[in-house]
Image (cartoon, rainbow, N blue to C red):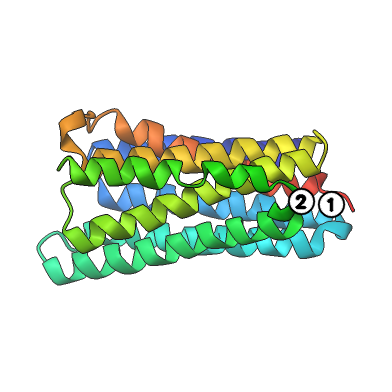
Amino acid sequence: MVFFYMIGALCVASSVAKAYFDTKKAVKPEFVAKLLASVSFMFCAVYAIYNNPQSVEYGIFILCALIFGTIGDILLCLDGFFPDNESYHKFFNTVGTAIFFIGHVMYMTLLFVYAPISNTPFLLLALPVLPLVMLALILTNKITLPKIKSYLMVVYFAVAGGVIIGAVSFLLNSRGATVGWLVLAASVLFAFSDIFLGLFHYCPSLKISEKVAPYIVMPTYCIAQVLYALSIYYIAY
């Protein structure tokens, strides 16, 4: 486990470095730091699967979600290499966000498979909360996105909420086991990172500092991914 914690610490340190280079607009070092952080949390997942052979099915699902998140994130970083090419910028942002979204859907699907929502149907009452918040921001003209993309964000937020609901259901079904708390913490941090990032980019009225936001978004995101990977080690059947 010491080795696992060392790789996890490297991942978080790389995420802080990525945030630092982001604030300095140093595109290449930022990309390298992001890649190192992503490789680190994926390695955490592989190492956890290796140390808990019974977790292979669950672990591979988590690893695939991590891979989709990594690909999406890397694509979102690539637009910085083409600052004067608007078409490239749109391509990397659109495709990167779509692939990142698939990672969210995979997490939600995994949690609903391992903790059927039929066991905790009352949790579905909370599903509309995040999309309704997003809808309220759209209707009050606080979101600076085209209408279609704004409403796609409502769907995005619905899935983010679904991940949290799935995590709560997972915790309840695990009867408070360590793996349940790890998954819940990971899901809340993951959703928080995404929501904060969205508000930072598309809700200028909040006046979130460009010098502060990266230090909140990246570390919370990477800690979430490490916790998902660590949950593989603790999952039991």
| Residue 56 or residue 30, whichever sits in front | 56
Binning the other alpha carbons within 10 Å of mark 1 as few (below 14), some (14 to 19) or many (20 upward) gives: some
Circle 2: element type: helix
Q: Is residue 32 left or right of residue 151?
A: right
Q: Quadrant of residue 62?
A: bottom right
Number of numbered labels in the structure image: 2
Mark 2 → mark 1, Cα distance in angstroms? 5 Å
The structure residue drawn at horizontal position 26% and vertical position 51%, both measured from the top left corner, is 27
Q: Is residue 191 visible?
A: yes
Q: Which residue is mark 1?
A: 51
Residue 213 image offset from top left, x and y in percent: 31, 33
Residue occupying the far left of the picture: 84
User: Compared to 84, does 179 lie above or below?
Assistant: above
| Residue 172 or residue 180, whichever sits in front | 172
Circle 1: element type: helix
Residue 209 image offset from top left, x and y in percent: 22, 28
Residue 145 image offset from top left, x and y in percent: 18, 53
Quarter of the image with the N terminus in it:
top right
Residue 3 image offset from top left, x and y in percent: 74, 40
Q: Which residue is mark 2?
A: 48
| Residue 54 or residue 34, whichever sits in front | 54
Q: Is residue 36 visible?
A: no
User: Compared to 116, does 169 lie above or below?
Assistant: above
Q: Is residue 18 left or right of residue 161?
A: left
Check disc 1 and give the amino acid type.
Asn
The structure residue drawn at horizontal position 85% and vertical position 53%, both measured from the top left corner, is 52
Asked if the residue at tag 1 contacts the one at tag 2, i.e. Cβ–Cβ closer than 8 Å, the answer is: yes
The structure residue drawn at horizontal position 72% and vertical position 54%, both measured from the top left corner, is 118
